[in-house]
Image (spheres, rainbow, N blue to C red):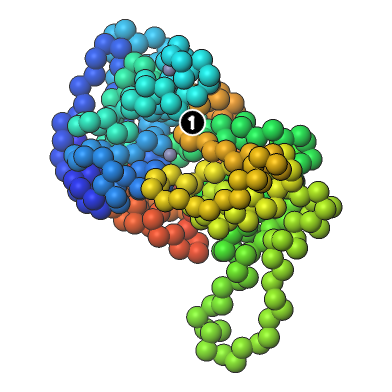
Amino acid sequence: MRAVVYRGPNTLRLETVPVPRIGPGELLVRVAACGVCPTDIKKIQYGLLPPPRIFGHETAGTVVRAGARVRGFRAGERVALHHHVPCLQCHACRHRAFAQCAQYQRTGITAGFAPAGGGYAEYVRVMPFVLPGVVRIPARNSFIEGALLEPVNTVLKAIRRLALLRGDSVLVAGQGPIGLIFTRLLALAGMRVIATDLLPARLKLAREFGAAAVHCPAGPAPSPARRSAPRAPRPAAPNLATLIPRFTRGRGLDAAVITVPADDVVGEAQALVRGGGQVLLFAHTRRGTATPLDLATVCVDEKDLIGSYSADFQLQAETARMVFSRQLDVRRLVTHQFPLAQTARAVELATHPTPDSLKVVVTPGAPEG
Ligand SMILES: [Zn+2]
Ligand SMILES: [Zn+2]
């Protein structure tokens, strides 16, 4: 079969590899769609894991073979996969810290080599311990909708970490695919969302996804054509520090979600949440840099600085309901589809988004409408 093999930092090659052989408790799935996810991009760019590997973990496809001992799935079924499932028994699991569980950290889906998701290939092997996370895709829904359960699940898990009451005010900084999912799910839960992004097109979509207010921190970027024209005086864009008190009637934000890896945004959010509020980090995945923080905002003002990473398979059924009912219509997030042979281009676009790009998906089968 064809697969895109990671061969070292920034090196992805289309190669021919054996179709994975499955054991009696396993599934063989023909991949139809696999989302390009920032956590994979990071591993590819910085060479965080030794090659060779086949990445891609937001995967949906069709079961082509089920091992003799598999119950509940059979050939021909369209499924969304889930690559991490915790043991539910260890010390971390008893504290619901699933992402810290040793079994959870093992990847249960592979197309060959050390398991790394395998979605950038024609077929993947699904191991027994991740079968509880596999979800059937209803006939009316697309493979791409199935593939996007994983990122939606990570957002739902993060929102569960916030102590919010209906009607609360939440800042969602960054309206990329993840930020937009936050905006929609928070709006559906009855929160007043103020969404920020540098790109006007994303703010427009944030509005359509239910944001009560949007804000462009730098003001709209001038188009190249206009740059040479004589500059019209533009009123100074109001900043968040003046907008938030108005938006919250002086109370301050109940929570802020930071979906961009920018430390200054964290500092700004920490100042704008009310005493006892929460700032949640969702994109600060790179280790090794320290940042100054006035710790009295945590101790005296009781502002919690928290994080959330990865998914919670116990939220998978609820995630599937939100996505497949289209209360959260993830199809609107997908702007680009690439065939398997162009996975490197897909990763490149997801790494350097354009004003009109959001979620990028690799479709080893046919592209979906
Ligand atoms: Zn992902
Ligand atoms: Zn565990």
Left or right? Give the position of 353 relative to 315: left
| Ligand 2: quadrant of the figure | top left
Q: Position of residue 309 (x, y in %)?
A: 48, 36
Left or right? Give the position of 203 relative to 49: right
Q: Nearer the viewer, residue 181 or 61?
A: 181
Left or right? Give the position of 146 relative to 195: left
Q: Residue furthest right?
A: 249
Q: Nearer the viewer, residue 187 or 23?
A: 187
Check the image and report above or below for 102 versus 164.
above
Check the image and report above or below for 118 versus 4.
above
Judging by the rendered image, the residue that carries numbered circle 1 is 311
Q: Residue at x 39, y 9 (%)?
A: 71
Secondary structure under tag 1 reads loop
Q: Residue at x 19, y 36 (%)?
A: 1
Q: Residues within 10 Å of mark 1 (few under 14, many from 20)?
A: many
Q: Tell me if residue 118 can be seen.
A: yes
Q: Is the shortest distance between ligand 1 and the CB of mark 1 under 8 Å?
A: yes
- Location of residue 70 by image quarter: top left
Q: Residue at x 63, y 70 (%)?
A: 219
Q: Looking at numbered disc 1 in the image, what kind of residue is underneath it?
A: Ala
Q: Position of residue 177 (x, y in %)?
A: 52, 49
Q: Residue at x 61, y 88 (%)?
A: 231
Q: Position of residue 319 (x, y in %)?
A: 56, 30
Q: Position of residue 33 (x, y in %)?
A: 38, 39
Q: Tell me if residue 342 can be seen.
A: no
